[in-house]
């Protein structure tokens, strides 16, 4: 399995290169640019604009700009933000922990709720609980994340005052773990609800298929308790397609954080990408895209390795 992991990891390099080429090309084709605010300013002359373009390297052809960026990445130089002048790697490292914290909370909430709903719906097929869980799953899956976030703020923060409205901590207050968790609950739940709907349905279908297998009937014929049959024998085999669903939905977490972080003013990678997109900050956008692309590709690789852990019949060479 170690050779398989190394081989797959090496394959990520050309794929990442292809992603960066496409991303950089799309940015170059986008209307406007990082100097759009100065081009129509009466106080900025054409000579000053030309000097600014030359200093930022924007007067060079797009392929040359891309080669300079790739060369800098290989040497550990991510460039500087066009809006703040701060090194891009510093902007990313300052915020990536907040995004991982939000994603970790969303995954935890999703796993708990999806496992609970999926298992109970499968063992109580066609019951009132099963129909109710299915109905609310479809509602949550079809609801836009931004609208769900605004409604959650209105209900839980404004009306009931149970949780903070936005931010990562209380302003002008000393840091405390309890305060940080209170700020994390609402955005984490909003980010997880759409995934709960899909993951619980996947697990329900996989569990129903597994519970009808011959070895499950044999386990029941031996007199094993229902809890042992479901949790020990059926659940492990049912988790294999469930892991596939998780791997396919990992990109939704990274894209979903952008909307959630904007709605809840969460200072993470998604909010950084949104602000950089508004300002046409190409170096910062490329840095965030590179980190996000690598995280998505690496999570798919980890999912492949988890198959062998969950199913002994799977072997990688």
Image (spheres, grey):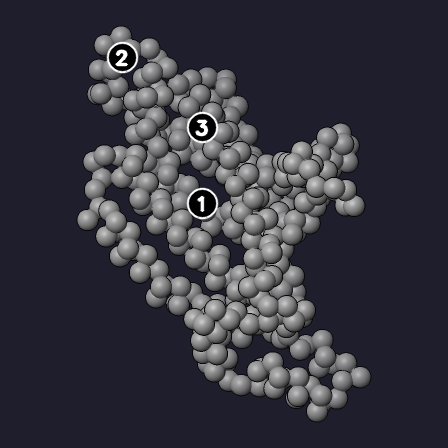
Determine the CA span between mark 2 and mark 1: 34 Å
Q: Is residue 207 above or below residue 63?
A: above
Q: Earlier in the sequence, mark 3 or mark 1?
A: 3
- Which residue lies most toward the bottom here? 47
Q: Which residue is mark 3?
A: 115
Label at residue 249: 1
Q: Residue at x 42, y 41 (%)?
A: 246
Q: Dot 2, crowdedness within 10 Å: few (<14), some or many (≥20)?
A: some
* Residue 142 visible in the shown view: no
Q: Nearer the viewer, residue 313 or 30?
A: 313
- Residue 17 occupies which quadrant of the picture? bottom left
Helix, strand or loop under label 3: helix
In three-dimensional space, the C-alpha distance between marks 3 and 1, rounded to whole angstroms, equals: 16 Å
Q: Is any atom of residue 237 visible in this view?
A: yes
Read off the residue under disc 2: 220
Name the residue located 66 percent from the left edge and 88 percent from the top edge: 51
Instruction: Give coordinates of residue 219: x percent, y percent.
Output: 25, 15
Whole-percent x, y for residue 58 in the image:
58, 82
Instruction: List x then y, in percent, for residue 107.
Output: 50, 38
Count the labels in the image: 3
The secondary element bearing badge 1 is classed as helix
Q: Residue at x 39, y 31 (%)?
A: 203
- The span from disc 3 to disc 2 (Cα, nearest Å) is 22 Å
- Residue 53 against residue 175 in the figure, above or below: below
Mark nearer the N terminus (3 vs 2): 3
* Crowdedness near tag 3: few (<14), some (14–19) or many (≥20) residues, C-alpha within 10 Å: many
Relative placement, left or right, of 69 versus 46 is left
Residue extending furthest toward the top:
223
Mark 3 near mark 1, Cβ–Cβ under 8 Å? no
First in residue order: circle 2 vs circle 1 = 2
């Amino acid at each position: 399995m170690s050779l398989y992991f190394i081989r797959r990891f090496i394959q990520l390099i050309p794929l990442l290169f292809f992603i960066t080429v496409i991303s950089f090309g799309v940015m170059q084709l986008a209307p406007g640019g990082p100097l759009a605010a100065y081009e129509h300013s009466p106080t900025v002359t054409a000579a000053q604009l030309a000097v600014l373009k030359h200093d930022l390297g924007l007067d060079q052809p797009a392929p040359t700009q891309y080669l300079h960026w790739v060369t800098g990445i290989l040497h550990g130089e991510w460039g500087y933000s066009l809006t703040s002048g701060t090194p891009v790697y510093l902007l990313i490292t300052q915020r990536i922990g907040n995004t991982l914290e939000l994603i970790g909370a969303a995954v935890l909430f999703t796993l708990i709720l999806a496992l609970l709903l999926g298992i109970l719906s499968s063992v109580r097929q066609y019951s009132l609980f099963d129909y109710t869980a299915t109905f609310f799953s479809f509602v949550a899956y079809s609801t836009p994340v931004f609208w769900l976030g605004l409604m959650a703020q209105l209900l839980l923060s404004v009306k009931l005052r149970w949780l903070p409205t936005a931010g990562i901590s209380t302003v002008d207050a000393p840091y405390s773990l309890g305060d940080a968790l209170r700020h994390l609950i609402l955005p984490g739940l909003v980010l997880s609800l759409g995934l709960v709907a899909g993951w619980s349905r996947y697990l329900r279908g996989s569990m129903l298929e597994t519970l009808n297998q011959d070895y499950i009937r044999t386990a029941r014929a031996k007199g094993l308790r229902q809890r042992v049959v479901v949790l020990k024998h059926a659940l492990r085999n049912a988790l294999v397609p469930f892991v596939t669903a998780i791997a396919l939905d990992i990109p939704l977490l990274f894209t979903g954080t952008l909307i959630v972080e904007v709605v809840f003013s969460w200072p993470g990678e998604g909010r950084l990408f949104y602000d950089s997109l508004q300002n046409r900050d190409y170096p910062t956008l490329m840095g965030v895209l590179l980190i996000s692309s690598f995280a998505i590709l690496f999570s798919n690789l980890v999912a492949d390795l988890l198959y062998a852990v969950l199913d002994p019949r799977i072997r990688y060479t």
